[in-house]
Every structure is written in C-alpha cells, then in structure tokens.
Amino acid sequence: MSIPVITIDGPSGSGKGSIAQRVATALGFHLLDSGALYRLTALAASKKGVSMQAEAELATLAAELEVEFVAQAEGEAQVLLAGEEVSLAIREEQCGMNASKIAALPQVRAALLQRQRNFCQAPGLVADGRDMGSVVFPQAVVKVFLTASARERANRRFLQLKARGVEVSLRALIKDIEERDARDINRSVAPLRPADDAVLLDSTAMSIEAVETKVLSLLPEF
Ligand code: DC
C-alpha cells in the first residue's frame, strides 16, 4: 500500500506551517517543512560566504546539508545544521529573503528534490511548502492550497516575531511579503501555484482551529 501524503502549499505567512504541524500531530504522521530546507541552504551559504547567485556551489551545499529535525513535545521541531542549533537563525527575515532567491535556481531545487521525497515514510507524511502538491508529491491523497491576504499574513508574521522577541515594522513586513510573493509566483521553475487538483482555502477570516478542522475533513479514511 502506498504511504499517504497530505500537501499544504501556499504563500509566506499563510499559516501552512502551523496547520501542517497540527494535522501531522492529529494523524501521527511525519512532517516535512520544505521551506526550512531552502532556509538552511541559504544559511549554510551565508556562513560559508557563498553568493546567493552561485548556482552550482549552492546546489552542492543543498545536496550535502547536514540537517537534523528534532521533534519537540510541543511547538516547532528543533533544527540543527551540522550539529549547531539554528532554529531561530533560519526564521530571520534576511534568511527567508535569501531562501526565496536561491529557491528560484533550478539546480538548487533539483538538489533538494530527493531529500524531500525521503521524508515520505510510514504511517504517512504532511508536507508544507510551495510545490509539494505540484512537483514533489504529485501522488498526494489530499492537496491544500492555503492563502490569506498579504496584510493578514504580514500581521500574523508580525505577531509571531514579536512573541519571539524580534523587533520589526509591520510596514516593512508587508513590503517583504509582497516582494517575496512576486518572486515565488513569477519564477520559471516550480512557481508558487496551486496544483490542478488542490483544494483552495482562504484563511484570512478563519481561526487556526477552523482551518485544521477543514483540512482534516478532506481526508479519506486511512
Ligand atoms: O515557507 P518558508 O517561508 O519557510 O520558505 C522560504 C522560501 O523558500 C520561500 O520564499 C520560497 C522557498 N520555498 C520554495 O521555493 N519551495 C518550497 N517547497 C518551500 C519554500
């Protein structure tokens, strides 16, 4: 029997990370935060002084990333890069911006493809990102494309960062989100776009609990 995969794609700040985590916990499935792999590649590059345009070098870094995701009893997994805790460092805005830049490079995407597919293990997987349903796991049993207005997404990010003690301006976040959306949507490889068979969900006016319930209601019996 094939291993069930649920994909949750969408733009930055749509809440897909939190939803994926909740759905994975509810089902006892594994979780793939694919954005973290792009962020880790960008972080590894800045630590090594590799340019965000050096496609071949970045692809080598992506292929050789020494990463560990350590699940926690609650909240996000702890992320280790070559044994060093980088959970907070990869969430910084600059790292997200660099991740979006390198994610437009075909060789980087190709280098991360198999690594992402390796997360598909029994009893099942919930994967979140931009191209989980369209490219990485086209066989997924349920594909969700989660979105929300740019203002609402910036606001959520603002509250999230504030709770972590990171100071940012809301206006700068809205600008960042719009810039990143434009790059993710307009790139030629695996652009941010719902898979043909994805269910579209606009979470602008929905609570996280309501979105979780809706996603779980889409699942067949496993
Ligand atoms: O979801 P996130 O904000 O952590 O992702 C960071 C960047 O990585 C995002 O701007 C686009 C890129 N990304 C991607 O191109 N494909 C994915 N599957 C996940 C992320």
Image: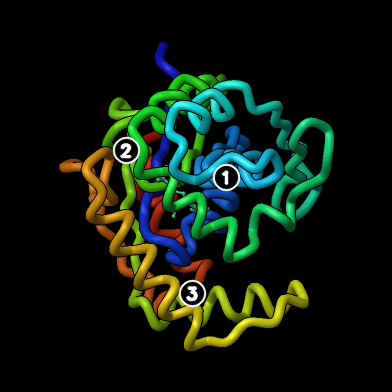
Q: Amino acid type of disc 1? A: Ala
Residue bearing the label numbered 3: 207
* Front residue of 186 and 51: 51
Asked which quadrant contains residue 175, the reply is bottom left
* Front residue of 125 and 163: 163
Which label sits in the foreground, 1 or 2? Answer: 1
Q: Residue at coordinates 44% horizontally, 52% vertically from top-left? A: 100
Residue bearing the label numbered 2: 133
The numbered disc on residue 51 is none
Secondary structure at badge 1 equals: helix
Q: Amino acid type of disc 3? A: Ser
Q: Amino acid type of disc 2? A: Gly
Against 202, residue 122 (above or below) is above
Q: Earlier in the sequence, mark 1 or mark 2?
A: 1
* Front residue of 204 and 192: 192
For the residues labelled 1 and 3, the Cα–Cα distance comes to 32 Å
Whether residue 27 is visible here, answered yes or no, is no
For the residues labelled 3 and 2, the Cα–Cα distance comes to 23 Å
Which label sits in the foreground, 1 or 3? Answer: 1
Whether residue 139 is visible here, answered yes or no, is yes
